[in-house]
Structures are given as C-alpha cells and as structure tokens.
Image: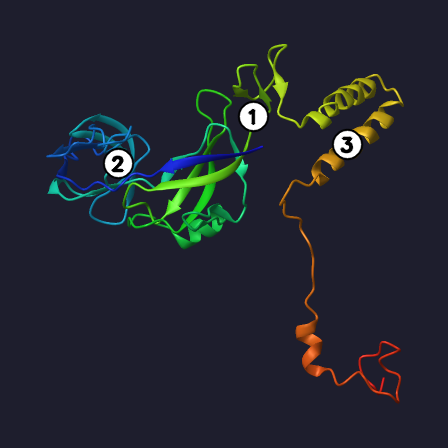
Amino acid sequence: AIRRAYLITHDDYTTGTVAIDVSSSRTAVTGSSTLWDTAVEGYSFNNARVGGKMKFSGQEIHEVTAVGGDTSITINPGWNGADLSADSYTYFEDEYALAADFLRPLDLRSFSLANDIPLIGPMAFRRSFPRNSIPNKPRVATIIQLGFSGNTTPRPRVVLAPPPNDEYSIPYDYITSYLAVSSAGTEQTQMTADADEPIIPLGFRHVLSLYAAWKWLQKKDDQRSLEFQANYTDLILRMVGTSNVGQDKPRLAVNISRYFSPRRLGRFDSESGAFDQLRDRWWR
C-alpha cells in the first residue's frame, strides 16, 4: 500500500562560540551564548539534538552523541586538534529518520518529486559527497539502514546533500511495511486479534488460505501441495497484474525510425516490387 509522509529538515545553527579543553576531554564541547537545548520556534525539535553533526575549524565532522544543556554537547569522534577557545562552529543535520512503517520508496529514482530531490545509491552518494558538511538546499538523497538498537525494528534513514540550510517541508511517497489493520483503523505489522484484517484487496484475500494450505501440505510431504502452490502463484500473478485507473504499465518501445528513416529511399516504386515484398531497399 502507498503512503505519504512529510520530512521537516533542520536549519544549520551557528549562534555563539565553542571551547574544548583537550587536557580534560576531547569529546566535551562547551558553548558560549548558545541555545543548543532550546526548542526551535514553531517546531518540536531543539537547536541541536543527538544524531546531528558539528564542524569546527578543519574538515573533520563530529557526530553529536549527547546534548547536556544549552551550553553542553558531547561529540564523537573527539576533537584531535589543540584547545579551542571562543571558536566558531557549524551544527547541521544531513540524516533523517523516515516514517515508522517505511519499507521502500515508491519511486526508486526520486525521493521527492515535489522538491525535485532524486535518489542515488549509497556508494555513488559517498563518492560524490565524501564530506557532506556545507549547508544549502538539498538536491540529492540516498537511503541507508542504521544498525539495530534495542529491538528488531529496522532503522531506515534518508541522507540529504547538501545538508539543509533551512526548515524545509519535504513530502515523500513510500510503500508501507504494515500488513494488517485493526477494527479501530490502526495499521500494524500483523494480525493479532480476530477482528483484524489484512491490507489486501477483498477479492484476493483468500490467497492467505492458499498459502497456508500449501505450506501445511508441503510440511506433511503431501503431493497436493503442488496444486495449492500453483493456485497460490496464479493468484499472486493476477494481483500483480491488476490494473487500477490511470496506473502506469511498463512497455518496451524501440524507436527504430531514428536509425532507418534518414537512410531510407522512396518505397512507393512501381517496378521493383520492394514495397510489396517489405524490403528496405529497392535493390535488395
């Protein structure tokens, strides 16, 4: 099923200055006149948050691992230079969480048509933006999967380049990972109650029974499992081939006219019979 969500990006933040005392800690950043733990006006996030990035003098990018207050941030990796005192900095975010039920993008070539942000592969993204640290309006994106944390829930993320330099509202369409819906209309990953229903068109819901019968008979080494497998496969193909109003269908159309038309001679000759014999040239 297709769903739509909106991604609200984070503006870069450069207010105040920073200091790092390497003799005590290379990961502790102290701010002056900073409001890192203060909410951005009109939004539900703060000026800085865990997962954001910081850049000081030089090219190294540091990830924010903790925000201890308006003037306290912990970074990783630690700062490897000399002490910083009243230095400038840039806080930015290029990596954003996607919808909780995000399975994959609807369009494998575009993250957001409305904002004209195409999708490219992670390897091409890393080659093109090895140090993605200069905020501007995003013009390309890639999707990655973070490691699991605390449970088995996947953690898909979208990475934007350049990192946003403002709060942008980016709509994107995706395929949901939810497979069922409760009687209250709440979508979920599986059916857990008698009143739950699968997110499958009504005319095809018996495909679940065919699949269950196929696997049950297969487990019992019953030859009838092959019949249920064939019926199940046929129904799946019918589901995939179902056309909705206005639905696009892939079609291969070779434009041969650009290759042959400039080279063709007149075909309406009355002597050779080339036209009637479907020959390309009158002398063939």
Question: Does 139 sit left or right of 284 as displayed?
Answer: left
Q: Residue at x 82, y 29 (%)?
A: 231
Amino acid type at image mark 1: Tyr
Badge count? 3
Checking the image for residue 78, the label placed there is 2
Q: Residue furthest front?
A: 245
Camera-near label (1 vs 2) is: 1
Q: Which residue is mark 3?
A: 235
Relative to 72, residue 141 above or below: below
Amino acid type at image mark 2: Gly
**SS at circle 3:** helix
Q: Which residue is mark 1?
A: 178
| Quadrant in which residue 67 is drawn | top left
**What's the distance in space between the residues labelled 3 and 1, CA to CA?**
21 Å
Q: Residue at x 48, y 50 (%)?
A: 120
Q: Report x, y in % for residue 144.
A: 47, 39
